[in-house]
Amino acid sequence: MTKLSPLQIERLKYEPKLPQSLQHGINSLEMIEGAPTESVGDQEDIKNLFPNTYGKPYVTFNVSSSSKSSEAVNVGVILSGGQAPGGHNVIAGLYDALKSANQNSKLYGFLGGPSGIIDGKYVEFDDEFINAYRNTGGFDIIGSGRTKLETEEQFQKSLAVCKKLNISAVVIIGGDDSNTNAAMLAEWFIKNDAGIQVIGCPKTIDGDLKNEQIEISFGFDTATKTYAELIGNIERDANSAKKYWHFIKIMGRSASHVALEASLQTQPNITLISEEVQQKKMSLASIIDYMADIIVKRANAGKNFGIAVIPEGLIEFIPEMGSMIANLNDIMPSLENDSAFVNATTIREKFDIVENRLDSANASVYSSLPTLIKEQLLADRDPHGNVQVSKIETEKLLIEMLANKLDDLKLQGDFIGKFSAQSHFFGYEGRCAFPSNFDADYCYSLGYNAFALISNGLSGYLSSIKNLTKPASEWVAGGVPLTMMMNMERRNNKMKPVIKKALVELDGPVFKKLADNREDWALNDRYLFPGAIQYFGPSSVCDITTVTLQLEQERELASV
Ligand code: FBP
């Protein structure tokens, strides 16, 4: 038998909390329909592409005065995309809801992400199987993957697998790309009279799958707390040794929510926010000037140390880099079929071919980069056509450029200090942590609620749990149509319907908190040390939500 850690043993016993409306089980629910919805952009295109699932209303659940009985159903579940703490609890919540409605219902887990439903690779869950994973981090219960569901052949194969297992509903637990898959599959199943519903659950540590109905994606809470613990520890080390500048890249493929939240929890000296860089059209050189200025000022005060937090997605938001990467993304498919490129014997030859193919302005940006970064930019795109920013060492690029800049300043007599830097990347460290109490409860509720949506006959909806800064019993359960979050974007050189990412709002309260304080944090050491996530103890420590969620909900309340 596998040996469990003491915390694992205790967490298995944790009983996740549910919103009051779901506490009486699936058979005692009444569904309230809200207003019809529109997509966030390109309404006509999205409506034409999703004629069967477009425009549906929001729904919420209340406890009903009467109780019904439910027929047995078979449901399949998929974990999709990057790991996020709490995924196992979504499955546990779904399983408990399905069994509470009818003990004869079955839950199947498709293995290895969306490819599991196409290839017919699955497991059937039972109590013993599920119980071993309650309140644990990771997606290892069934694994995950990033296969894009979009071709007729994939849909046909998925249908055949579902028919074989008599599955009448599929739950896809994923981020923006995975829930785009869910929307496509839902539409296709209805169009083909398959009798199979599709429900999504909002997952991603990146925190960029949110809107008025989805207050936060699961995993953000735990991942940001994990990174904040690590940053706090490094701040203490930096303040003790007083000899290093630490450059910490924080995960988050595109939006800077994770870096922003981790910084609000720890108050480092510098925090870059990609969305601000883009809005102010800051070039790489001006970012270096901004950072060098703080390093010089701190050195003048005798402080040759500090902490800089860098969002993972930064590189794509620097205008000249973003344009070059977009150009590179467009030429990548043809490069992969180009024998001169594929058979090039040296990396220099590859760089030359790339520079010849890029537009001239983009070619000169590309050619100005260090070899390491040029090489990393050529790595494979993910199945959705995204450059894999987690593989690009922006933190090292900034260190190299800053070292050169500070050398120049020293020669001119404008820098009297020392610059010794350490680089870090916090990403995978946070994605599989034991879910915080918040994520354990939220995820369980999302999964439970997904089955409420299924049992009320809906398809093409995302499970929604709101009012999240209140105690769990006051959370509001419901659903939001996936098409409502969609617009058209360029992917792999084609316009595609996708769920729109929520970026950091520069006029919102969360960014404002950073902007109002960063000058003070830059020069004075206002480091905060959040410490490790606490699972047991006073609620003021264990159940506290993120600064992002608190500030956003305060704004929401103020606007009512
Ligand atoms: P999702 O959007 O699928 O949740 O992925 C989140 C993420 O952790 C990003 O922050 C990161 O850039 C990416 O996954 C890394 O992907 P991979 O696990 O494939 O290296």
Image (spheres, rainbow, N blue to C red):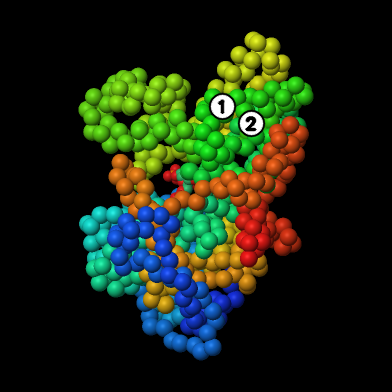
Badge 2: residue crowd in 10 Å (few <14, some 14–19, many ≥20) = many
Q: Is residue 419 above or below residue 263?
A: above
**In screen coordinates, is 426 left or right of 300?**
left
Residue 348 % position (x, y):
35, 19
Residue beneath disc 2: 246
**In screen coordinates, is 1 left or right of 14?**
left
Q: Given this view, does label 2 or label 1 mark the residue nearer the observer?
A: 1
Which tag, 2 or 1, sits closer to the chain's start? Answer: 2
Badge 1: residue crowd in 10 Å (few <14, some 14–19, many ≥20) = few
> Can the viewer see residue 449 in this picture?
no
Q: Residue drawn 73% across and 60% down?
A: 540
**In screen coordinates, is 309 left or right of 365?**
right
Q: Which mark is residue 80?
A: none
Type of the residue with mark 2: His
Badge 2 element: strand
On the image, which quarter does residue 188 sit in? bottom left
On the image, which quarter does residue 462 sit in? bottom left
Type of the residue with mark 1: Ser
Q: Residue drawn 29% across and 26% down?
A: 357
Label 2 CB-ligand 1 distance < 8 A: no
Residue 100 % position (x, y):
48, 79
Q: Residue drawn 56% across and 53% down?
A: 220
**In screen coordinates, is 260 left or right of 351?**
right
Q: Is residue 474 above or below residue 233?
A: below
Is residue 302 or residue 500 the one in the foreground? 500
Q: Is residue 124 above or below residue 105?
A: above
Residue 49 % position (x, y):
29, 59
The alpha-carbon separation of the residues under discs 2 and 1 comes to 20 Å
Q: Residue drawn 58% across and 43% down?
A: 259
- Mark 2 touching mark 1, by CB under 8 A? no
Residue beneath disc 1: 286
